[in-house]
């Protein structure tokens, strides 16, 4: 139990800390995607690759963060991210 207390010291309840960590992860992934998409639109080949990677990473976290969303909204989000990844594929 002492070890658990050290891991969450100063961060509040474990579920709150996990939620904050997850939100920060989604924010970082979203920012990476936005940054790389902007450069990809300007013709940067490496940015296209990085945007594809960022979109796949963001797609992987959506089922976890969107679990409490209505099913239709979650599916739309997943579909939109898949379409974005596919659109970046042939470029």
Image: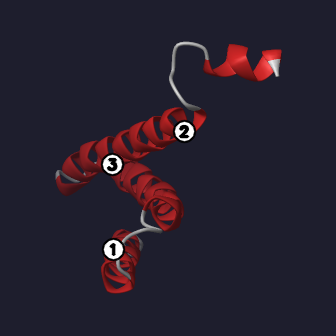
State the residue in front, 39 or 76: 76
Q: Position of residue 81 (x, y in %)?
A: 36, 71
Q: From mark 1 to mark 3, how far is it between C-alphas?
A: 13 Å
For marks 1 and 2, the one nearer the N-term is 2
Q: For the point 37% across and 76% down, which residue is it?
A: 74
Task: Report crowding for label 3: few under 14, some 14 to 19, many 20 or more residues within 10 A (C-alpha).
Answer: some
Q: Position of residue 38 (x, y in %)?
A: 19, 48
Residues at circles 1 and 2 in contact by the CB criterion of under 8 Å: no
Can you say which quadrant of the picture contains the N terminus? Answer: top right
Q: From mark 1 to mark 2, how far is it between C-alphas?
A: 22 Å
Q: Nearer the viewer, mark 1 or mark 3?
A: 1
What label does residue 77 carry, if any? 1
Dot 3 falls on a residue whose secondary structure is helix
What label does residue 30 carry, if any? 3
Tell me if residue 27 can be seen: yes
Q: From mark 3 to mark 2, how far is it between C-alphas?
A: 18 Å
Q: Position of residue 8 (x, y in %)?
A: 62, 21
Which residue is tagged 2? 18
Dot 2 falls on a residue whose secondary structure is helix
Can you say which quadrant of the picture contains the C terminus? Answer: bottom left
Q: For the point 33% across and 50% down, which residue is it?
A: 33
Scheme of colours in the image: secondary structure
Task: Report crowding for label 2: few under 14, some 14 to 19, many 20 or more residues within 10 A (C-alpha).
Answer: some
Q: Position of residue 62 (x, y in %)?
A: 45, 63
């Amino acid at each position: 139990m002492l070890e658990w207390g050290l891991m969450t010291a100063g961060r509040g309840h474990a579920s709150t800390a996990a939620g904050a960590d997850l939100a920060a992860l989604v924010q970082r992934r979203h920012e990476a995607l936005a940054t790389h998409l902007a450069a990809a639109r300007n013709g940067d080949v490496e940015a296209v690759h990085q945007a594809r990677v960022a979109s796949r990473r963001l797609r992987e976290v959506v089922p976890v963060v969107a679990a409490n969303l209505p099913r239709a909204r979650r599916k739309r989000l997943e579909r939109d991210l898949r379409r974005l990844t596919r659109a970046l594929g042939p470029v």
